[in-house]
Amino acid sequence: MTPRLRPERPSGHPGPRRAAAGLVGALAAVVLAGCTIFPSPGQEPTDQDGNPLPAADAEGYRPAPLYLVALNGAFPPDTTGREVACQDLLVRAQTVPVDSEDRVGTSIGFLLDDEQYSHGDPALTNSLDPSEDGLAYSSSRVEGDTVVLELTGDVVTRNQCESFRIRAQLNRTAAAAAGVPEAEVLVDGVRIEEILGLTEMELGQEITTPPADTTGTEDSESADPEDPLEEIGDPGQLNGGG
């Protein structure tokens, strides 16, 4: 099996497309989870990157974790992530709270169904967007400390940098949703590394981008600041509502 190639657009990114069902408007931004939490007795469990695992509310709704990519040279301010190939930054985000019995399926399904490549400005990007019409979630299972993610169909990639992003997004999203440190991604039973011609995944160091420049905002400090972090999705739509 070989990946299906998609020609580069002049801008180097896919053109604008309508927002995916289950997203709110144009999705100005996402909720970022970049805080490091050290384990201690009685503390909430965290994933392999130190991010707290989602906690259920009184009705069992929890945010679904997912990973997006900030492209080199266009990092959002004050954002924490891990370096991935081509000096991009893999960033953890989350949906609005959802009620789901298949946490991995919910998170991976969002990445695969998302029809919008860029979220926010500066943007976090979803390199699974071009694969939307050809790649589908099949199942997942946990074997020890590894979740095995099964997909079917075709992986669409335009270059090697995008191949690294695709693999990293799928791998880390599946692991975070399953609550285990490792993940293996299979497409029609074949490891994604073999399909995309990649070596074993090694993420770089964790970094936090500089905060936004607030010069000239002193006069507006008395006003209520607009929260730049919006949650992805509409709770009713993500849970099958109208």
Image (tube, helix red, strand yellow):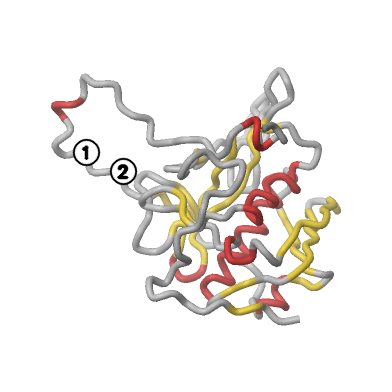
Q: Residues within 10 Å of mark 2 (few under 14, many from 20)?
A: few
Q: Residue at x 53, y 53 (%)?
A: 68
Q: Residue at x 39, y 75 (%)?
A: 10
* Residue 39 in sight here: yes
Residue 169: mark in rendering: none
Q: Residue at x 70, y 50 (%)?
A: 109
Q: Which residue is mark 1?
A: 214
Q: Position of residue 90 (x, y in %)?
A: 52, 56
* Vertical placement of residue 63 versus 14, above or below: above
- The one nearer the camera, 204 or 34, is 34
Q: Alpha carbon of mark 2 to alpha carbon of mark 1: how far?
A: 9 Å
Q: Quadrant of the C terminus?
A: top right
- The one nearer the camera, 57 or 184, is 57
* Residue 172 in sight here: no
Q: Which residue is mark 2?
A: 211
* Vertical placement of residue 117 versus 231, above or below: below
Q: Callout 2: helix, strand or loop? A: loop
Question: Which residue type carries mark 1?
Answer: Thr
Question: Which residue type carries mark 2?
Answer: Pro
* Vertical placement of residue 164 versus 48, above or below: below
Count of marks overlaid on the render: 2
* Vertical placement of residue 169 versus 216, above or below: below
Q: Position of residue 25 (x, y in %)?
A: 48, 40
Q: Are dots 2 and 1 in contact, CB under 8 Å?
A: yes
Q: Residues within 10 Å of mark 1 (few under 14, many from 20)?
A: few
Q: Callout 1: helix, strand or loop? A: loop
